[in-house]
């Protein structure tokens, strides 16, 4: 996964232009690294050919882990470890445990899914991420094409030009993301672009 | 003018009239065999008393209230989605309107049944109707019911019932006519659309506020909770509301899928089905939350006098109650089944699966209402026989008749609704 790679970056200012561009780039056989957009664009994942996310399956597994944790722990505490007489109710007081079981189910599933999401998006505190274009958080739709050994980057730039990109440049960035992998001296924003 | 209305196929008409005739036969059978106008006997008085007269009214009450409240949630659904500026449901809005157009008819039937029960002095249904309960110094004086007498009395009961049914019908009619008028007035520009949406907001707000005052509070207390007269639960109205809302959504789903299957509703896609499925899933969970809470609040706070409701149904530690099976069948059909079946995205987008779950939910909540009404009326001698299903058929037939009337007269697509485009390109 990791390593220094070369990317051709094309910025679009209209999603109407972006969609056919994504389609044509894929048809031409170039490898799209990712498309960065200021807001969620409906149908873009489909156009990029991304597979359906499995985060809900992960969520389900975290949820049943939470259910099991809650039920085993409470029943152990109240029947084996420290039985208490609460209002004359049975020690195994299932109705009273349902709310806690429910809360723990939700907590495990929610926190687990957030952490999984961060892992999949390669996000973590103190990780420096290479930003291909700061304007992808403002008004540009930024398509990043990864160059392999056989890719001619001039040809890709011309292709993006024809597809309607407003700004095109070539960047070298490190992929992969774990703590400390990035070059400490690397400038994440290139001042000369004038942003 | 209305070039998108639905020509009712022969099979639809056959089913409608078949169900209505079957239902009327059941009513006739009840009239002849059950002596519904004989002097009522409260089931606690004689252990082996003939409960058929009670059964007749109890089944009518259960079905009329269930189907009325279910149909009424169709308008509630329109109003909340309007107030939330929702756009996705516009493509199938006419179907919800069609279901809500049955409310005046079902309301009238319900009101006649309530009138017969209250004016007929059916103390076997509503124990609080007995005037001897409120005479001080006699053996029959009931301190608890005397305290509730300001609320539970025939005058307030009938006036509030009439007002509720009347206002649901009137406000619903206003919402429907706003929608239908937009068909004739041609496309709206920005200013007209804003004005039109504003009047929608106004009537939708009135409807939702009154819905809160009626369905989400007083109406279930009066119509259903007062059967178990001494008992009360602060969860009851929410429970009833959740039950009817989820079955109302399922009813919308069934009609939408039927029409889609007939080649109508061209703008309704899997995306819309996915969202209806989400609603059905979410409100099944909401219903289960209230189903459990009603039990747990009484159990946990040590209120022995309020356990009567559950002893009548599921029994106590030593003896299983007569409704034990139905009570937990409820949990399986109305919670576990929708939860597990509709959890996956692919099942919510599958027309067949959603139809199956919708029918299951409608049936499950009918059973839910059955176990809400029967223990306090016919007690342990309940029956689930062709008579009970026949009465249900009558109400289903009436709903099909009303919906058929509406969709064969009016366009199925609200073509000038400002949010129609948003609904057409809807993507979940």
Image: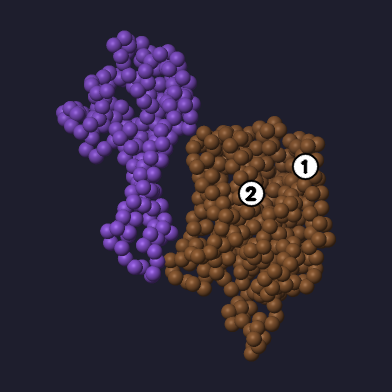
Chain colours: A purple, B brown
> Image height check: is A16 above or below B209?
above
Query: At 46% across and 24% down in the image, what residue appears?
Result: A47
Asked if labels 2 and 1 touch by Cβ distance under 8 angstroms, the answer is no
Disc 1: which chain? B
Q: Which picture quadrant has residue B371?
A: bottom right
> Image height check: is B244 above or below A180?
below
* Image spot of residue B261 (x, y percent): 68, 33
**Label 1, on which residue?**
B15
Report the front residue among B159 and B23.
Answer: B23
Q: Which picture quadrant has residue B367?
A: bottom right
Q: Which mark is residue A100?
A: none
Report the front residue among B382 and A64.
Answer: B382
Label 2 crowd bin: few (<14), some (14–19), many (20+), radius 10 Å: some
**Label 2, on which residue?**
B363
Gap between marks 1 and 2 measured at Cα: 18 Å
Q: Is residue B180 visible?
A: yes
Query: At 59% across and 82% down in the image, what residue appears?
Result: B143
A2 horizontally vs B315: left or right? left
In which quadrant is the N terminus of chain B drawn?
A: top right
Query: At 82% across and 53% down in the image, what residue appears?
Result: B25
């Amino acid at each position: 996964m990791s390593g220094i790679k070369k990317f051709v970056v094309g910025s679009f200012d209209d999603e109407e232009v972006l969609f056919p561009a994504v389609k044509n780039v894929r048809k031409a056989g170039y490898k799209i690294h990712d498309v960065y957009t200021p807001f969620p664009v409906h149908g873009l994942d489909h156009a990029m050919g991304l597979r359906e996310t499995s985060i809900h399956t992960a969520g389900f597994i975290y949820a049943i882990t939470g259910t099991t944790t809650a039920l085993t722990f409470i029943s152990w505490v109240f029947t084996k470890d420290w039985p208490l007489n609460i209002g004359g109710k049975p020690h195994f007081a299932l109705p009273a445990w349902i709310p806690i079981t429910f809360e723990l189910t939700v907590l495990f599933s929610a926190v687990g899914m957030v952490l999984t999401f961060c892992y999949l998006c390669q996000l973590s505190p103190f990780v420096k991420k290479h930003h291909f274009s700061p304007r992808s958080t403002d008004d540009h739709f930024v398509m990043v094409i990864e160059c392999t050994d056989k890719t001619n980057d001039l040809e890709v730039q011309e292709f993006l030009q024809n597809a309607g990109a407003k700004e095109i440049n070539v960047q070298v960035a490190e992929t992969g993301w774990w703590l400390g992998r990035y070059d400490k001296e690397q400038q994440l924003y290139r001042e000369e672009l004038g942003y | 003018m209305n070039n998108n209305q639905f020509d009712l196929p022969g099979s639809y008409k056959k089913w409608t009239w078949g169900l209505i005739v079957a239902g009327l036969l059941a009513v006739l059978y009840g009239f002849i065999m059950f002596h519904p106008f004989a002097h009522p006997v409260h089931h606690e008085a004689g252990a082996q008393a003939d409960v058929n007269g009670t059964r007749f009214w109890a089944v009518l009450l259960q079905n009329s209230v269930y189907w009325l409240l279910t149909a009424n949630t169709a308008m509630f659904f329109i109003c909340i989605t309007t107030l939330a500026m929702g756009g996705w449901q516009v493509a199938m809005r006419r179907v919800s309107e069609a279901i809500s157009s049955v409310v005046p008819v079902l309301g009238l039937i319900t009101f006649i049944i309530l009138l017969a029960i209250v004016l007929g002095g059916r103390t076997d249904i509503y124990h609080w109707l007995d005037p001897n309960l409120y005479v001080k110094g006699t053996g029959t004086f009931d301190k608890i019911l005397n305290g509730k007498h300001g609320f539970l009395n025939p005058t307030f009961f009938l006036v509030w019932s009439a007002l509720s049914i009347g206002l649901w019908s009137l406000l619903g009619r206003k919402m429907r006519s706003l929608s239908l008028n937009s068909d004739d007035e041609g496309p709206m520009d920005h200013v007209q659309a804003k004005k039109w949406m504003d009047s929608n907001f106004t009537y939708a707000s009135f409807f939702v506020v009154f819905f809160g005052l009626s369905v989400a509070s007083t109406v279930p207390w009066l119509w259903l909770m007062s059967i178990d007269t001494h008992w009360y639960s602060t969860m009851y109205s929410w429970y009833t509301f959740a039950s009817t809302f989820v079955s109302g959504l399922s009813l919308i789903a069934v009609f939408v899928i039927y029409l889609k299957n007939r080649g109508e509703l061209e703008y309704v896609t899997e995306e819309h089905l996915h969202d209806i499925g989400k609603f059905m899933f979410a409100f099944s969970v909401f219903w289960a939350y209230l189903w459990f809470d009603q039990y747990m609040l009484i159990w946990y706070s040590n209120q022995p006098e309020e356990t009567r409701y559950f002893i009548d149904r599921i029994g106590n530690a030593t003896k299983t109650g007569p409704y034990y099976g139905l009570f937990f069948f409820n949990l399986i059909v109305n919670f576990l089944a929708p939860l597990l079946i509709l959890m996956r995205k692919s099942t919510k987008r599958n027309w067949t699966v959603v139809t199956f779950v919708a029918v299951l939910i409608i049936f499950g909540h009918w059973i839910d209402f059955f176990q809400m009404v029967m223990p306090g009326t016919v007690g342990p001698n309940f029956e689930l026989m062709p008579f009970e299903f026949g009465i249900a058929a009558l109400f289903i037939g009436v709903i099909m008749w009303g919906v058929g009337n509406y969709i064969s007269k009016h366009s199925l697509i609200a073509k000038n609704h400002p949010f129609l485009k948003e609904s057409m390109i809807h993507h979940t």
